[in-house]
Amino acid sequence: MNSNIITLIISFFIIVLAQVFLFNNMFIFGFINPMIYLLFLVVYRFDDDQTLFILLSFVLGFCIDFLSQSGGAHTIASLTIGFVRPLLIKYSFGVTSEAPSTFQNDLRRRNKYIFLALLILIHHLLYFIIVYFNWNATYLILKNTILTSLFSLILIALMSQFYKKLNDT
Amino acid sequence: MRRIIEALVQFRNPVLYFVLLVLSLLFLNGRSHFHQYYLEKYSLYFSQSFYNISSDIVNYFRLKKINVKLIKENKILKDFQLKSNSISLYPNAIKAKRRFSFKVIDANVIKNSYLNQRNYLIIDKGHEDGITSEMGVISDQGIIGVVKSVSKNYSSVISILNQDLKINVRLKNSSAFGSLSWKGTNPNDFQIDDVVISSSVIKEDTIITGGMSSFFPLGIPLGKISNYEANTKSGYYKINASLFEDPSQVYYVYVVENFDIEEIKKIKKDILK
């Protein structure tokens, strides 16, 4: 249990630094900027305290915003994801079946990818809506959301594989 | 208190979410000018509609006060209007400095009769408010009558709907003089007598007060000519006229005070001697 917390804290810092210094400078096709910091919100234990999780997702978004000199868009989007994650878990893993305790330990591959895709899509949609904040930019918002989501999904799916080995206890 | 705390504990996640959301919105507002602009725009929109409702409600209760204020303002404007109407009609209006001896006092009509042949009004101002007999009474779109008798707080007014009252009038375009009187039937049916046939009369010409009666200043618009016929035998026109305002439906009036009336009366007396 203790090692889990340490892993969490270290991964928090690594994820934030990787996002800010590596992925924020990455422009695939000139405009796609994958957001891998959502990985933290994915691998955090599902059965842990929800209140703490909301607080953590706020802090995560705040750190990203602060270090990448953006407004408050990351904060709002990741905070909202922190709030709605239980709902997403419920809908993607099934209401009746038992919810998994962590993302990486579950073996239902299809449900896992639905969960991941939903989480990333909602986050990105919210993020780009806040960034553009204009009805006239609807096309731009949708285009950015879908393309960036695709790359974020691939990267986060790959990276979550690391946690599989770390968290196997 | 205990229940509130229990509810807070029970709904701690949504509460925390909304608190942090507000915080991050404030953060967004502070960091980005673009978002600041839009957020201010939306907040202005919401607060404006809220304030609109509240000011509507507040204004409704202030209507009486506002009315009083407006009447006061109207009184001042009426003064200016009378003055400018009158003075601009004289020749060499711009060059010569001219005395204007009229002032208005506002009043409410508390009784108005219009069904008889000789109608009277009662207004709620008397000699305490500076009203004396033989003052003119006007409304916002015409004249109403002449003050007859005055008590402490009330005065009676001979209505323009009274066959005994003849008012000195002028035609605006031809400047022919005549006297306006009521026909005694419809409150909108008037006739003008004593217009000499040599003067030119046009249909729809505006009738203004003539300024020779010492009750009214020159140039208050009253009504217009509806039709006329020339009577070559008597040498006068027979003109039918209608007023701009129905005198039977007037609630606010202005009493016109003439400072010089004593002076004029004295001279009239000298002539008769």
Image (cartoon, coloured by chain):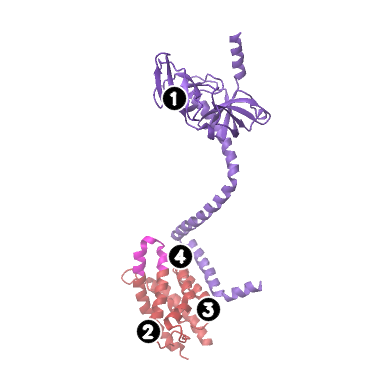
What residue is shown with label 1?
B240
- Chain of the residue where label 3 is placed in the rendered structure: A
The residue where tag 2 is placed is: A110
Label 4 residue SS: loop
Q: CA distance from mark 4 to mark 2?
A: 35 Å
- Decide: marks 4, 3 in contact (CB < 8 A)? no
Q: Which chain is purple?
A: B
Q: Secondary structure at mark 1?
A: strand
- Residue type at mark 3? Gln
Residue B196 percent coordinates (x, y):
43, 15
Residue at mark 2 shares a chain with residue at mark 1: no
Q: Amino acid at mark 1?
A: Asn
Residue A162, quarter of the rendered image = bottom left
Say whether residue B108 is visible. Answer: no
Looking at the image, which is closer to me, B213 or B88? Answer: B213
Q: Which residues are magenta?
A: A127-144
Cα–Cα gap, marks 2 and 3: 25 Å
> Which residue is labeled 3 in the image?
A50
Q: Colour of chain A?
A: red
Q: Circle 2 — which element?
A: helix
Distance CA(mark 2)–CA(mark 1): 96 Å
Q: Residue farthest to the top?
A: B273
Tell me the residue that label 4 is attached to.
A71
Percent of width and height locating residue B233:
41, 13
Give the CA separation, mark 4 to mark 1. Answer: 78 Å
